[in-house]
Every structure is written in C-alpha cells, then in structure tokens.
C-alpha cells in the first residue's frame, strides 16, 4: 500500500467579488435545475448572506463589521460562504453532469451545515445528513466536470470518463465519526465490486472535522496548530481504516483518498485549509497516477 500526502492548500481570502459570484451562481444554478429558492431555506440563506456581504461598505467589509451586531452577522455569513462558494461553483457545472436530476431533490433539503434559525414561533430546522451525503457526491462530480471530463451520477456514486481515455467509478463516503470510517470503506468496496468498474473510494472528512448537529468552528492559538489539528484527524481516520483499506485493495479497489476543508478561527478571523491524504493499491495498474489525477481535480 502506497501513501501520498497532498500539500495543504489554504482557502483563498474572502472578497466581495467572490460573494457577488456566489450569490449569482446559486440563483442561476437553482433556476437551471428548476429549484424555487423561496421554498429552499438553506440555499436561499446562503444566497442572501452572500448578497449581504457583497452589499457592505468596502471599509466595513474589510474590518469584519463596524458594530457588534454587524460583526456577529459578518462572522456567521463569512463562515457560511465556505459552503456557498463551493455550492455556487458546483451549481454552475450542473449542466455538465449527466443525470444531475439525481441530486436535485437533495439540494432542496436542509444542507446548511451551520443550521438555520426557524421563523418566529417555530423550532429551528435540523440538518439532513443524508442530503449532505449526496451534496458531497454532487460537489465531487462538479469539480471533476470542471476539468472537462464526462461525469454522470451513476453507481458506485460518480462515474468518470476521462478526456484522454479510461473510466473510473468513485464511491463517495462521508463518515460522521472516526470509528465509522472502516464500515463505509467496506460499503464502498462492495459498491465498486457490484458495478464492476475500475474504482476508487473517496472519504469526505468534514463531518468528522466539524461535527454533524451543527458545524463547530474551533479556535486555534496559531495557524500551524489549526492545520495540525486537521492533519491529526485525517491521520486518525486512516489508522482506523487500515484493515478495511487492505481488504479493499485485495478486491481490486485502486485507491482511497481522504480529503476535506478544515476550518478554524484565529484572532477572530476565519481560516480554512484543504487537507488531503491518500493510499493506493500497489498491485493495481496505474493506481498512483489515478489517485494523482483525481487529486488534481478535487484540490486545485
């Protein structure tokens, strides 16, 4: 089993131009898929926050707000932009994903990992974990499609036909806790065997990074310690899944890639870093190259 560590990539700085783009992409993408934003609280909340940030006075935006109330909303809205920017980019590629309608109904559910406050007199909405599972599949498909490859929402979860030839089936898993990673890798292995595709398992780490009830953003004393905490959690997940990965490789699975955006606050500012680490099947043809090709699509 070979191991590859992908260099950490810091999330780009949030700008008002990016907020404008996210608001536009969410609105246009929802319209293209026939989603009524007025009836989709999570997507509309992201769009409204993106619009609010883009409408701030430049000086107020640069300082994260000028009043306590404005600073509080700025912090929540800027954290939500980590989701909105990714989802906006994914929605902009929806027309390039075959059978994208498989994802449509999940996009209208409660997919805001911050949670959404209920209307007066109503209980706050919970988070639909199954919808977030499918949202991860949608984001993976969209990132690969952005590189010009043919992508469809087909078993094992995402099916890729590369521009320079070859197919790859990707089983996308989103564990809620480290102790559940091995079971999901076993599930991904079964999916790949059943669909008889050359296959890879992708493990999204964000539920482990930030919890499942509502996203939890930890404070870090230093940037290095923030990055180190994310790396520690990925290391724990890989260690817990070691036997499951060996079984998967024994059945011909090409590789397993763990990745996700780890977010933390430092001196009252929001930081994010994309972390990825993978293992490939040393007995499979071009396994390391396959892992590298997928990594290039997912971690720009």
Image (cartoon, rainbow, N blue to C red):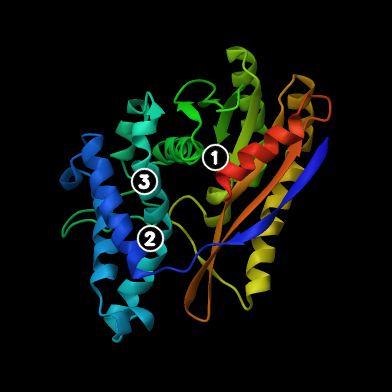
Camera-side mark, 2 or 3: 2
Residue at x-position 25% and y-position 75%: 56
Q: Which residue is mark 2?
A: 80
The quadrant in which residue 57 appears is bottom left
Sequence-first tag of 1 and 3: 3
The quadrant in which residue 173 appears is top right
Q: Depth check: 101 or 124 in front?
A: 101
CA distance separating discs 1 and 2: 20 Å
Q: Which numbered disc covers residue 174?
A: 1
Q: Is the residue 48 above or below the residue 88 in the image?
A: below
Q: Is the residue 73 above or below the residue 103 in the image?
A: below
Q: Is residue 176 visible?
A: no
Q: Which numbered disc covers residue 187?
A: none
Q: Which numbered disc covers residue 111?
A: 3
Crowding at dot 1, Cα within 10 Å, few <14 / some 14-19 / many 20+, comes out as many
Whether the residues at callouts 2 and 3 have beta carbons within 8 Å, the answer is no
| Helix, strand or loop at mark 3 | loop
Q: Residue 5, how many percent across, how many down?
A: 74, 50
Sequence-first tag of 1 and 2: 2
Which quadrant is the N terminus positioned in?
top right
Sequence-first tag of 2 and 3: 2
Q: Residue 59, how many percent across, how many down?
A: 31, 84
CA distance separating discs 1 and 3: 14 Å
The quadrant in which residue 46 appears is bottom left
Horizontal relation, residue 60 to residue 207: left or right? left
Q: Residue 123, how many percent across, how many down?
A: 25, 53
| Helix, strand or loop at mark 1 | loop
């Amino acid at each position: 089993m070979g191991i590859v560590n992908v260099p950490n990539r810091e999330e780009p700085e949030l700008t008002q131009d990016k907020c404008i783009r996210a608001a536009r992409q969410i609105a246009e993408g929802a319209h293209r898929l026939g989603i009524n934003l007025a009836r989709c609280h999570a997507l509309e909340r992201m769009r409204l926050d993106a619009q609010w940030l883009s409408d701030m006075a430049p000086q107020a935006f640069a300082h994260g707000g000028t009043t306590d109330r404005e600073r509080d909303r700025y912090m929540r809205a800027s954290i939500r932009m980590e989701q909105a920017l990714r989802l906006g980019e994914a929605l902009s590629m929806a027309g390039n994903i075959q059978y994208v309608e498989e994802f449509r109904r999940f996009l209208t559910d409660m997919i805001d990992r911050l949670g959404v406050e209920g209307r007066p007199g109503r209980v706050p909405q919970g988070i639909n974990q199954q919808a977030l599972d499918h949202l991860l599949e949608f984001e993976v498909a969209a990132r690969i499609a952005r590189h010009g490859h043919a992508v469809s929402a087909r078993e094992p979860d995402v099916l890729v036909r590369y521009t320079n030839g070859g197919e790859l089936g990707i089983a996308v898993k989103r564990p809620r806790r480290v102790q559940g990673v091995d079971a999901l890798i076993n599930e991904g292995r079964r999916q790949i065997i059943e669909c008889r595709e050359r296959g890879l398992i992708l493990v999204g780490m964000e539920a482990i990074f930030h919890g499942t009830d509502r996203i939890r953003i930890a404070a870090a004393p230093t940037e290095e310690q923030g990055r180190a905490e994310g790396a520690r959690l990925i290391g724990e997940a890989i260690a817990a899944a070691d036997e499951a990965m060996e079984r998967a490789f024994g059945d011909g699975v090409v590789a397993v890639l763990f990745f996700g955006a780890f977010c933390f606050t430092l001196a009252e500012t929001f930081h994010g870093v994309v972390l990825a680490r993978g293992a490939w099947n040393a007995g499979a043809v071009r396994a390391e190259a396959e892992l590298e090709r997928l990594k290039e699509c997912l971690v720009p």
